[in-house]
Image (tube, rainbow, N blue to C red):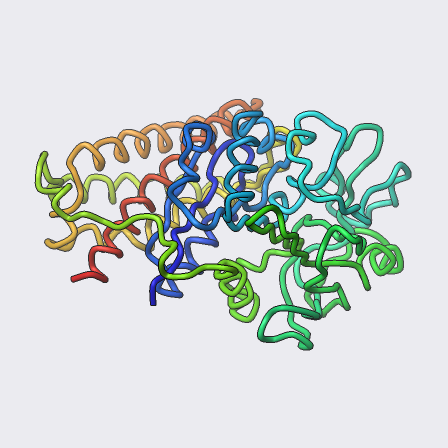
Amino acid sequence: MIWPEVGIYVGPGTSHSWTWFADVFERSGICGVSFFDESEVAAGALKNINVFFISGGDTFAIADGLGRQGAEQLEAFITKGGVYIGSCAGAYLPLKSSLSPLNLFNFVAARITNLTKDLPVPKKMAEKFCTEYGCQYVYHPVREEVRVKIVDRFSCRGQEITVPLYGGPALTGSDDIEVLALYTGFTDKTEFLVDEKIAEQTLIGNVAAARKQFGKGVLYLFGPHFEHPGYPEANRILIEAMLDGFSEGNTKKDINRAAFDSGNRASKKLVRALRSEISNSRIVALALERMRYQWRIGRKIYDPEKISVFLESIWSRIEAFEHTEAVDYIREEEIEHLWEIAKRATGMLREIKKDSDKGEETTGEAEQLFADLRKLSAKFLSIYFRLKRIELKS
């Protein structure tokens, strides 16, 4: 099967959850996967893809990072036939807003139900359960697993499935959207951050997933994380969404092996050095997890556990880089660049641990660390999916 060309946004404000898209695509045999930061989007990278994904994170920071140029590129991409799929923060991003810089992305006129001037009393996770939104607050009534009913379009319509929810929106139905799924209930894994009755009023019966036609293209908004790799039923829905309107004649690009015949090829020794550095980072990250430390970066709370998600996205795949055939299609400068970022990340992790042991503030260091981890994971996965595509064509 010929799959669409896929782009995943990895710029400022995105959390670790974009790596879940990579997991789902790899498991589905989708190899045409690219990773774009804000500068690449502004430079026109969306012209090379069919589907663009934005994951969870800090919606304000994502909007600020993309800026006006990114908003214009995104609008042009969708109106000319592209498919936009937003999950959690990526679902909030295109909703109509008067607040800057969100007002650059006013593509969908749908209201959220988890917005209030009068916050409910949090039962737990007070630091995570709400975010300021002008003179109001976006609040998150539950975390972990919820039940949703698929009501339209997808092959499993009429069925109820479970999906994880980590701060995504609940929408009211409107003439501007096609309702695809509704929140219908909770499970024994649901964590209530507010009173259960308030959670029910906020979520149950409201929209969990929606679609909007936009010019020749379409937007899909998913409140819960349908891309979480632990939920295969939800993953299949995501794959169906990305195939919306796609035909094999619309694929954007192909890999040219000859492009890698020139230049210095990476040595296995250099790959092993990179693997060793990732191992070093994993050891320090595990030590930080035991400290139960947190950082507020922008409007989001970051836990040490999120560090490991980035590192594991590399560690679980790096062995493939040591195969003889793979090294033929990796340039030496690519691995050297990854190695430099990895060494910087390890050094920053050690600094954070040392300063945390002293009780010192480490938010600035953590912010730089997560920026490096995003860059490291994205560049590694770009090479990895390139190798998967070459392997598939062999």
Q: Is residue 43 left or right of residue 174?
A: left
Q: Quadrant of residue 302?
A: top right
Q: Looking at the picture, tell me which residue is in the foreground, 42 or 388.
A: 42
Q: Quadrant of residue 198?
A: bottom right
State which quarter of the image contains the C terminus: bottom left
Q: Residue 314 placed where, x, y %?
A: 34, 48
Q: Is residue 308 left or right of residue 13?
A: left
In this rendering, is residue 135 above or below 115? Answer: above
State which quarter of the image contains the N terminus: bottom left
Q: Looking at the picture, tell me which residue is in the foreground, 392 or 381.
A: 392
In this rendering, is residue 147 above or below 289? Answer: below
Q: Residue 377 placed where, x, y %?
A: 38, 42
In this rendering, is residue 162 above or below 56? Answer: below
Count of all numbered marks drawn on residues in the image: 0
Taking the spot 30% from the left edge, 48% from the top edge, the residue there is 253
Q: Residue 7 placed where, x, y %?
A: 43, 46
Q: Looking at the picture, tell me which residue is in the foreground, 2 or 382.
A: 2
Taking the spot 26% from the left edge, 56% from the top edge, the residue there is 388
Q: Is residue 309 left or right of residue 231?
A: left
